[in-house]
Image (spheres, helix red, strand yellow):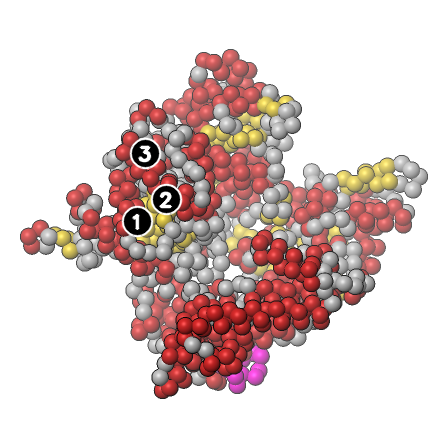
C-alpha cells in the first residue's frame, strides 16, 4: 500500500475547510500579499477604510514586541492616528463575539527570513495568521512537524512584517495523529495535546479533528477565551480538552442555575490553570458579585496565589489575615500603592473564611454580603470542608454557589465519619460536572505511570527472630517496624539505590513515614551513614506521636505547616526539628528556625523551592508535601507508612509529573506491604481493570522488550562497524529509531533495583559502542543544521532524545584519574585502558566537546609528566588552550576582547545565553543589517561552544 503524499493530505484539508466549514480561500504568496490581504480584512472587520499611511501606522503598531506582547496587542484595541488628525479605535479580534470574526485559509505562504521557508496551511482571522498547520505524510513521526515549526520560529516567523508572530495555536498532523499547542517556544513535544470529546475520547484523525477543532466558531473561541497569557514566564498557554469542558460546564452551571457542582480531574492534570480560567470568566458575569477561591492550608494559599498571579500578575490578592479578607470582601482593601481596591477574585484559606463568618467582631461587616451571588471554588474539596466549617459557610451565604475541584473524590467506600456522619463529595457539592481520571491522563501522556516495588516484607522464624530480607507476607508490629535493624537496612537500601532510581540524581525523591517519631529516627540513621545525599526534613511540631493519618485522611494538624497550635507543642519534637533545621541552615547558608510560625513557614517555602530546583536529594516527611505539591523533577517516593484510597493516590502522584523522555515513570518504593491498598485505590479512582494502565509492567517484561528491540537493531546493523556502511538516509533513520527504542527501554530498566546487564542479550560494552555511532550521526546532523539553508536531509527533524543517555558523574576530573591509571599501567594493559578512555569520551555527550583537547593532551604531553603532576600539568595545558581559543575567536571575528570577557563572565554567572544586542556590543565594526543577521548568530554559536568546551563540566 502506498503512503498518502503530504500534498494530497494538504489539499484534502483545505477542501474540507473551504467547502464544508465555510472558510474563504485566499491566495497569498509572500509577506507583501499577506499585508495587502490584512488591510482589506481589517477594513471589512472594522467597517472603515485606511489610507496607505494609516495602514503603515497599523503595521508599525503590530510589529512591536515579542510573541507574548503581540498576543496582548491582538486582544487590545488600537487608537489609530488618522491622516486628518482625529483618532479612530481599531479592533484586531472580537473576543466577545468570536463567531463574528472573518475566517480565511491559505497554503504555501513563503517567507524569506534568515532562510526561505514555505508553510503548509495557514488560518487567517481578520487577516492575521492566528493558526498554523504543518503536515507530514502518513507514516512519518509527528515530532518532525513539531521540530519543523521550531525551525520556522528561529528562521522566518519574526522576519519582514513578523505577522507570523501572531500565531496563537499550532496544529501538527500526519493524517493519523493530530495535535495542537500554543505558540510557546519554551515547551517540549510532551506539551502538545490531542483534542477530545467531553468523554475524553481522543480525536486523532485529521479530518475528524478539523471538523471538531477547526470549525470557525470553535477555533475562534479557543483563541478568544481559552488561551491564558501567563504574565510571569511571559508565555501563551492553551487549555487541554478536559480543561475546556470543565470550564464550560462550570460557566453553564453558574449562568443557568443556582446549583453546586464538582470537577473530578486527577492529580497532576493542571487543576490550577482550569480553576483560574473558570474564575477569570466567572468574574465577568454581570450577576456574580465575587469569586472566592478556597484552599485549606496556608502553604496552598501561598502556592495558589503565586500560581494565579503567574497567569495574570496582580489579579489575586493573597489574604494574610482575616481582617484583610473581610476588607477584600467589602472592597476596602488597599493595594501596593495604598489605593482602595475592590477585589473581584479572592484567594483565602477555609480557616480564615470560617473565622470571618463565625467570630462576632467580623459579623457586622460580613452581614451585608449574606445574600450576594458569590461563587466559591474549593481546591481539593475532599479535605477539611467535610466538617463544621463547610456547614457554616453554606449557612451564612444564602445565595452562594459552590464549585469543588478534586483529584480524588470521597465515595461511600472511602468516606470517614465525623459528628456530621459519613459525607461524600456528592453530598456536599451535588452533581459531578466533568470527569478526567488517572487512566485518561496516562493515556494522554499528561501524567506518568507508577513503577511500584515492594521491598523487605517480613515473617516470623523459629525463636521469634525476624528475617527482614525475605519478600513474604509482613507482620506490622510496632516493635518490628521501628526496630533499629530494620531502619538501618532501609536507609542502606535507599543510599545504595537512590542514584539508580533518580538517574544519577537527575531527579530527586521524598520519603514518607508513619509518625514524627519514626521520621526523627530515620533522619538520625541517615546522618550516621556515609553518603553524598542532601537530606532535609519538615514536620508539624504539634503533638502527634501516634500515626492518626494512616487511613489516608489528612487532618489539619499534621498536614498543615502554617497553623501551629502553640498550646500543644511537643518540646522533644520541636527541639529535634530545630536541630534538623540547623543542619539545613549549614547546608544552604540560611537562618530558619521554629521560633515563630512565620519563620517556620519561610522554612517550608525554602524547602519547597529547593526540592523543585533539585537542590535537595531526599525530603523526609510524615504528611506535609504529600498533597498539593508539584515538582516535575521529583520522580521517586520511598514509603514506610500505611496509606490507602485518596491518601495513597495523592502521595504516589507526587512522582508522576511529566518532564522529559528520561523521566519515564514515577518510582514508588514501598517498605510495607501496600499491594492490596494500591490495587483498591486504583480500582476506586479509575476501575477494577485499570492496573495495567496505571502501573508499569514487571521487570521481566522490560527485559524481554529490550532483547526483542536488540534483535531489531542487529537486523539493521549486525555489528557496530556496519553502522558506518549505512550510506542510505532511510537506513540511517531506521538505525536511529531502533537504537532510540533501546535507549527508552534501558531508561526504564535502570529504575528497577533488580537491573543487571547479564539479564540482557546485549552487553554493556556493545551498548556503549552502538551509542558512540548514534552520537556520531547526531553530530553530523547537528553540523548540517548549523550551516542553515533549506532542509536537505530527512534526518534533520529526528529527535535523538539525548536526555536518555545516562549521565553518570563522569567529568574531566574522572578522566584525569583514569589518565593516572593509564600512565602507571603495564604496557600490556595500556591498549585496553586507552580504549576505555576513548569509549568514555565518545559516549558521554558532556565530554565530546572536550574530546579533541583531552586526546591531544594524552598524545603530546602525558609521556613526559610524573603521575603526581598530571592534574597540575593538565590545568596548565587547559588554560593555555583556552587563551589560544579565546584569542582566535576575537581575532577572526574582529571582537573587542574586554567586552567579550565581560560577556562570558555574565553568561557564566547568569547561566543565560547572551542576547543579540549583547553580542553586537562586542563587535569592533558595526555591520549592516543584512550582515548582522549572519554575523551575530555565528559569533554567538562560537562563544557558546567556547564556554561549553572550556568551562562546563
- Disc 2 to disc 1: CB gap under 8 Å: yes
* Relative to 510, residue 313 above or below: above
- Tell me where residue 146 sits by quadrant: bottom right
Q: List the residue tagged with mark 2.
A: 583
Distance between mark 1 and mark 3 Cα atoms: 18 Å
Pick the front one: 435 or 345: 345
Residue at position x 76%, y 44% from top?
A: 92
Quarter placement of the N terminus: bottom right
Magenta span: chief secondary structure: helix
Distance between mark 2 and mark 3 Cα atoms: 14 Å
Element class at badge 3: helix
- Tell me where residue 359 sits by quadrant: top left
Element class at badge 2: helix
Pick the front one: 689 or 909: 909
* Relative to 833, residue 363 above or below: above
Q: List the residue tagged with mark 1.
A: 527
Residue 943 placement, left or right of 611: right
Residue 949 in magenta stretch: no
Residue at position x 50%, y 64% from top?
A: 953
Residue at position x 43%, y 38% from top?
A: 591
Element class at badge 1: helix
- Tell me where residue 456 sits by quadrant: bottom left
| Sooner in the amino-acid sequence: mark 1 or mark 3 | 1
Distance between mark 2 and mark 1 Cα atoms: 10 Å
Residue 785 placement, left or right of 952: right
Mark in front: 2 vs 3 = 2
Residue 574, numbered label: 3
Residue at position x 71%, y 71% from top?
A: 892
Residue 29 placement, left or right of 644: right
Tell me the magenta residue range: 723-731
Residue lying farthest to the right in this orientation: 84
Amino acid at each position: 500500500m502506498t503512503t498518502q503524499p503530504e500534498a494530497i493530505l494538504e489539499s484534502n484539508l483545505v477542501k474540507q475547510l473551504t467547502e464544508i466549514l465555510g472558510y474563504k480561500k485566499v491566495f497569498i504568496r509572500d509577506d507583501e500579499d499577506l499585508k495587502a490581504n490584512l488591510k482589506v480584512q481589517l477594513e471589512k472587520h472594522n467597517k472603515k477604510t485606511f489610507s496607505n499611511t494609516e495602514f503603515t501606522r497599523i503595521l508599525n503598531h503590530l510589529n512591536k514586541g515579542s510573541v507574548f506582547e503581540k498576543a496582548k496587542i491582538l486582544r487590545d484595541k488600537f487608537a489609530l492616528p488618522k491622516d486628518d488628525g482625529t483618532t479612530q479605535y481599531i479592533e484586531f479580534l472580537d473576543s466577545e463575539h468570536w463567531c463574528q470574526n472573518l475566517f480565511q485559509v491559505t497554503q504555501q505562504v513563503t517567507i524569506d527570513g534568515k532562510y526561505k521557508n514555505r508553510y503548509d496551511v495557514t488560518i487567517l482571522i481578520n487577516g492575521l495568521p492566528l493558526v498554523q498547520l504543518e503536515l507530514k505524510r502518513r507514516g512519518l513521526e509527528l515530532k518532525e512537524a513539531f521540530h519543523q515549526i521550531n525551525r520556522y520560529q528561529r528562521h522566518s516567523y519574526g522576519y519582514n512584517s513578523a505577522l507570523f508572530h501572531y500565531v496563537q495555536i499550532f496544529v501538527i498532523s500526519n493524517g493519523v495523529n493530530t495535535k495542537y499547542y500554543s505558540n510557546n517556544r519554551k515547551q517540549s513535544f510532551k506539551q502538545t495535546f490531542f483534542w477530545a470529546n467531553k468523554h475524553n475520547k481522543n480525536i486523532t484523525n485529521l479530518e475528524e479533528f478539523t471538523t471538531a477543532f477547526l470549525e470557525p466558531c470553535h477555533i475562534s473561541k479557543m483563541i478568544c477565551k481559552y488561551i491564558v497569557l501567563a504574565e510571569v514566564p511571559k508565555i501563551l498557554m492553551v487549555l487541554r480538552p478536559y480543561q475546556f469542558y470543565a470550564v464550560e460546564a462550570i460557566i453553564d452551571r453558574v449562568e443557568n442555575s443556582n446549583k453546586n457542582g464538582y470537577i473530578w480531574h486527577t492529580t497532576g492534570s493542571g487543576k490550577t490553570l482550569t480553576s483560574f480560567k473558570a474564575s477569570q470568566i466567572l468574574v465577568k458575569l454581570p450577576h456574580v458579585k465575587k469569586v472566592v477561591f478556597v484552599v485549606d492550608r496556608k502553604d496552598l494559599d501561598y502556592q495558589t496565589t503565586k500560581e494565579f498571579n503567574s497567569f495574570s500578575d496582580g489579579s489575586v490578592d493573597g489574604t494574610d489575615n482575616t481582617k484583610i479578607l473581610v476588607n477584600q470582601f467589602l472592597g476596602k482593601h488597599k493595594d501596593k500603592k495604598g489605593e482602595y481596591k475592590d477585589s473581584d477574585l479572592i484567594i483565602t484559606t477555609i480557616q480564615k473564611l470560617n473565622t470571618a463568618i463565625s467570630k462576632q467582631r467580623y459579623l457586622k461587616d460580613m452581614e451585608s454580603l449574606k445574600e450576594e451571588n458569590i461563587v466559591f471554588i474549593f481546591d481539593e474539596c475532599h479535605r477539611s470542608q467535610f466538617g463544621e466549617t463547610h456547614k457554616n459557610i453554606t449557612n451564612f451565604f444564602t445565595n452562594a454557589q459552590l464549585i469543588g475541584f478534586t483529584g480524588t473524590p470521597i465515595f461511600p467506600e472511602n468516606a470517614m465519619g465525623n459528628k456530621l456522619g459519613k459525607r461524600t463529595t456528592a453530598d456536599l457539592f451535588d452533581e459531578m460536572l466533568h470527569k478526567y481520571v488517572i487512566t485518561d491522563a496516562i493515556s494522554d501522556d499528561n501524567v506518568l505511570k507508577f513503577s511500584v516495588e515492594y521491598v523487605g516484607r517480613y515473617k516470623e522464624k523459629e525463636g521469634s527472630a525476624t528475617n527482614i530480607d525475605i519478600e513474604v507476607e509482613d507482620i506490622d508490629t510496632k516493635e518490628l517496624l521501628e526496630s533499629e535493624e530494620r531502619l538501618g537496612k532501609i536507609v542502606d537500601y535507599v543510599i545504595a539505590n537512590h542514584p539508580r532510581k533518580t538517574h544519577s540524581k537527575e531527579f530527586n525523591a521524598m520519603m514518607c513515614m508513619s509518625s514524627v517519631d519514626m521520621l526523627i529516627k530515620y533522619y538520625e540513621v541517615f546522618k550516621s551513614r556515609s553518603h553524598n545525599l542532601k537530606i532535609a526534613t519538615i514536620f508539624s511540631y504539634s503533638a502527634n506521636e501516634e500515626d492518626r493519618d494512616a487511613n489516608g485522611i489528612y487532618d489539619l494538624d499534621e498536614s498543615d505547616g502554617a497553623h501551629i497550635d502553640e498550646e500543644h507543642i511537643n518540646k522533644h519534637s520541636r527541639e529535634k526539628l530545630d536541630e534538623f533545621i540547623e543542619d539545613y541552615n549549614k547546608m544552604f547558608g540560611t537562618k530558619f528556625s521554629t521560633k515563630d510560625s512565620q519563620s517556620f513557614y519561610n522554612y517550608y517555602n525554602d524547602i519547597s523551592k529547593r526540592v523543585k530546583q533539585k537542590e535537595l536529594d531526599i525530603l523526609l516527611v510524615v504528611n506535609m508535601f504529600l498533597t498539593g505539591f508539584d515538582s516535575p523533577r521529583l520522580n521517586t517516593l520511598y514509603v514506610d507508612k500505611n496509606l490507602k484510597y485518596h491518601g495513597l493516590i495523592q502521595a504516589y502522584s507526587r512522582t508522576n509529573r511529566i518532564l522529559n523522555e528520561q523521566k519515564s515513570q514515577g518510582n514508588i518504593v514501598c517498605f510495607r506491604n501496600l499491594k492490596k491498598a494500591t490495587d483498591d485505590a486504583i480500582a476506586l479512582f479509575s476501575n477494577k481493570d485499570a492496573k495495567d494502565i496505571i502501573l508499569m509492567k514487571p521487570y521481566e517484561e522490560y527485559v524481554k522488550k529490550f532483547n526483542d528491540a536488540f534483535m531489531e537493531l542487529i537486523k539493521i546493523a549486525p555489528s557496530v562497524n556496519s553502522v558506518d556502511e549505512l550510506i542510505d538516509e532511510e537506513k540511517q533513520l531506521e538505525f536511529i529509531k531502533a537504537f532510540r527504542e533501546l535507549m527508552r527501554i534501558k531508561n526504564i530498566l535502570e529504575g528497577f533495583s533488580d537491573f543487571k546487564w547479564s539479564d540482557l542479550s546485549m552487553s554493556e560494552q556493545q551498548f556503549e559502542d552502538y551509542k558512540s555511532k548514534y552520537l556520531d550521526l547526531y553530530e553530523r546532523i547537528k553540523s548540517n543544521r548549523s550551516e542553515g539553508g533549506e532542509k536537505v536531509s530527512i534526518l534533520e527533524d529526528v529527535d535523538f532524545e539525548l536526555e536518555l543517555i545516562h549521565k553518570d558523574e563522569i567529568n574531566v576530573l574522572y578522566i584525569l584519574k583514569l589518565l593516572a591509571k593509564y600512565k602507571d599501567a603495564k604496557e600490556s594493559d595500556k591498549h585496553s585502558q586507552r580504549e576505555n578512555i576513548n569509549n568514555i569520551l565518545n559516549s558521554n555527550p558532556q565530554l565530546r566537546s572536550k574530546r579533541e583537547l583531552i586526546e591531544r593532551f594524552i598524545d603530546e604531553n602525558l609521556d613526559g609528566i610524573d603521575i603526581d603532576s598530571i592534574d597540575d600539568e593538565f590545568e596548565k595545558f587547559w588554560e593555555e588552550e583556552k587563551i589560544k581559543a579565546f584569542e582566535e575567536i576575537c581575532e577572526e571575528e574582529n571582537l573587542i576582547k574586554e567586552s567579550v570577557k565581560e560577556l562570558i563572565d555574565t553568561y557564566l554567572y547568569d547561566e543565560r545565553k547572551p542576547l543579540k544586542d549583547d553580542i553586537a556590543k562586542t563587535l569592533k565594526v558595526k555591520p549592516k543589517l543584512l550582515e548582522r543577521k549572519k554575523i551575530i548568530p555565528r559569533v554567538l554559536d562560537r562563544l557558546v561552544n567556547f564556554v561549553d568546551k572550556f568551562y562546563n563540566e
